[in-house]
């Protein structure tokens, strides 16, 4: 009986000594499982930014050839807005135009024409006529904003609207559009009423496409964390083309120290122009037939 009890005791001790090994094995297996699990859910380090990857995807996506007209606002005797530090809007817009041209030139089937590549003055109507002359598919007017409110900041995207939002817009009449654009749209019928109605029809369609372009730009600005004030509208003369989708982009406020600093920073301006170029390509692809 004693031997039997002793045997049971030794068996019990043996089972107890094995338990830590089992526990250790279990811990090791558990650790291995955790390691494997963490490996499965590791976030890969991207070699390029999201913006760079999107540019790469869109680079060869267009099947047709397009002309983009970039209009650097102001110039020459017209400095535009002037910051407290003496920064001229005309210089900011010219620099932005050059950067945006470089960004767009990376895409296949894209040709870029600029209204000015130096410090010269151009009448507003001449800018539109230049765009019509090269049969531009998109008209982008670049500006920098100003406000008495020093805290006002951010990017605004303007399109033309029938509803005037300021005094300047009210002064722009349909009569001016007829006299300025009747020769740009090749209309055989010379009846003034028919010409007027056709111009309205062309312009309405163009305004809708311009609005669509502005939405794409604003969406991408948000996507890439570029602060915007959203869509705005006014009767800007340079947006009056009845056949070219046109937007005016206020790149920021020169009256805001942070915005001014950004607009003079090469990396920021490149980031902004790369984003706008992506939006333009998306718009063209969306409307490509």
Image (spheres, rainbow, N blue to C red):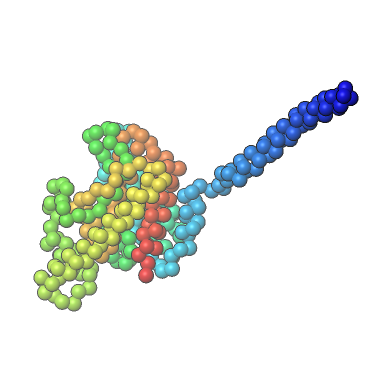
Direction top: furthest residue: 2
Residue 32, given in percent of the width and then of the height, sits at 68, 39
Query: Which residue occupies 88% across, 22% down?
Result: 2
Query: Which residue occupies 37% across, 47% down?
Result: 221
Query: Which residue occupies 14% across, 68% down?
Result: 197
Direction front: furthest residue: 1
Q: Nearer the viewer, residue 250 or 222?
A: 222
Question: Image quadrant of residue 229?
Answer: top left
Decide if residue 212 is in sight here: yes
Decide if residue 72 is in sight here: no
Note whether 95 is above or below 115 in the view shown: above
19 sits left or right of 104 in the view: right
Residue 71, given in percent of the width and then of the height, sits at 31, 54
Q: Which quarter of the rendering shows the N terminus?
A: top right
Q: Which quarter of the rendering shows the C terminus?
A: bottom left
Direction right: furthest residue: 3
How many numbered discs, if any? Answer: 0
Query: Which residue occupies 50% across, 56% down?
Result: 56
Residue 125, given in percent of the width and then of the height, sits at 22, 58
Q: Nearer the viewer, residue 121 or 39?
A: 39
Note whether 189 is above or below 143 in the view shown: below
Q: Nearer the viewer, residue 35 or 191?
A: 35
269 sits left or right of 129 in the view: right
Question: Image quadrant of residue 260?
Answer: top left
36 sits left or right of 171 in the view: right
Note whether 37 is above or below 132 in the view shown: above
Residue 137, given in percent of the width and then of the height, sits at 33, 64
């Amino acid at each position: 009986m004693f031997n039997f009890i002793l045997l049971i005791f030794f068996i019990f001790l043996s089972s107890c000594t094995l338990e830590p090994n089992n526990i250790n094995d279990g811990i090791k297996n558990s650790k291995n499982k955790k390691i494997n699990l963490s490996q499965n859910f590791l976030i890969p380090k991207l070699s390029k930014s999201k913006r760079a990857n999107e540019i790469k995807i869109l680079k060869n996506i267009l099947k047709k050839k397009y002309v983009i007209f970039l209009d650097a606002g102001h110039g020459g005797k017209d400095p535009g807005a002037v910051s407290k530090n003496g920064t001229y809007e005309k210089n900011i817009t010219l620099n932005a135009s050059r950067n945006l041209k470089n960004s767009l030139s990376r895409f296949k089937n894209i040709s870029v024409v600029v209204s000015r590549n130096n410090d010269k003055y151009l009448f507003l109507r001449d800018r539109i006529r230049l765009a019509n002359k090269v049969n531009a598919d998109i008209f982008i007017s670049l500006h920098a904003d100003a406000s008495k409110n020093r805290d006002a900041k951010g990017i605004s995207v303007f399109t033309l609207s029938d509803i005037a939002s300021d005094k300047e817009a009210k002064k722009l009449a349909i009569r001016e559009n007829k006299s300025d654009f009747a020769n740009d749209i090749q209309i055989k019928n010379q009846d003034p009423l028919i010409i007027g109605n056709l111009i309205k029809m062309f312009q309405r369609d163009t305004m809708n496409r311009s609005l669509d372009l502005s939405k794409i730009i604003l969406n991408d600005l948000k996507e890439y964390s570029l602060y915007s004030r959203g869509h705005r509208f006014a009767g800007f003369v340079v947006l009056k083309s009845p056949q070219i989708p046109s937007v005016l982009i206020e790149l920021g406020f020169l009256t805001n120290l942070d915005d001014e600093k950004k607009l003079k920073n090469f990396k920021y301006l490149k980031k902004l122009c790369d984003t706008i170029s992506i939006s333009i390509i998306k718009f063209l692809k969306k409307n490509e037939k």
